[in-house]
Image: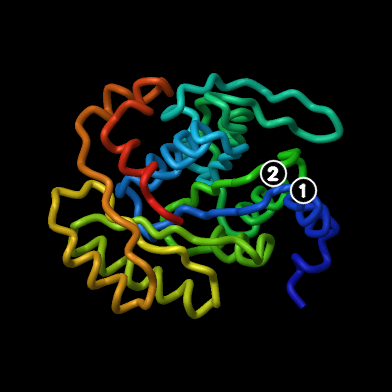
Amino acid sequence: MNTRDLDPRTAIVAKRLQGCARVLAVTGGKGGIGKSMIAALSALTSARKGLRVGLFDLDLTGPCSHMILGAECGFPAEKGGILPPEVAGIKLMSVAHFSGAQPAPLRGDDLSSAILELLCITLWGDLDLLILDMPPGIGDATLDVLALAPRCEFLVVCTPSAVVQRTVARTTQFLKDQQANIVGVVENLSTGDTAETQALAQDAGVPFLGAVPLDVALEQASGCAEPLAATAAAAAVAKLDY
């Protein structure tokens, strides 16, 4: 039996997630592919469609969702648990609320315990969609999410890079081996030709959801929800059917 199964917090996490109609993990298996931007834009565009949305930045050692959305760091309010602050209609939980600009080096059991603790203490309430911004790689965080949120769906982010595509192919196969529900693959930083990513998705037996263009406006828009929502990348994310 896994020690997680004996931890009373595991049962509490299940209760915390009861009010979330869908839990969607945005992953890619590699850093630098714009995964956090896709997660943030997915949350932003979903909120603008009228959905009740939460975003949990699970990259505990390098969180950036708060910077993308322009959320101010500060200890969240408490009322029987942590109430995630809202930014642009999104309930946002990030370790940055607690650590600020200070580094938070974690590994192994410490990382798993931190994820479990944050899931345990966060009061999401009723949500239509909870998005998990996964850290790079397919390590402990992915295994923890699979165990703690078994109905979680996975959106896999790819780019036109051959190196990234090989990594994403391995990530997708790993998720399939774990019997995870993969909603599809999206090509980020796209320059137009998506043939290779479409072939990757077909080989993996998962849907190809579409492409998000390489958008130079994102850098300037990052940090403010209104300009972000007006970018071509946001418009493309809003059209993804997952």
Marker count (numbered): 2
Q: Amino acid at mark 2?
A: Leu
Alpha carbons under labels 2 and 1: distance apart: 11 Å
Examine the rendering and report whether any part of residue 11 can be seen. yes
Q: Amino acid at mark 1?
A: Arg
User: Where is residue 80 drawn, in percent x and y?
Assistant: 86, 33
Q: Toward the viewer: 54 or 135?
A: 54
Examine the rendering and report whether any part of residue 122 can be seen. no
User: Where is residue 180 drawn, in percent x and y?
Assistant: 54, 71
Q: Secondary structure at mark 2?
A: helix
In the rendered view, tell whether residue 213 sits above or below residue 164: above
**Residue displayed at 57% across by 27% down:** 89
**Residue displayed at 56% across by 40% down:** 55
Q: Which mark is residue 118?
A: 2
Q: Secondary structure at mark 1?
A: helix
In the rendered view, tell whether residue 88 sits above or below residue 192: above
In the rendered view, tell whether residue 138 sits above or below residue 221: below
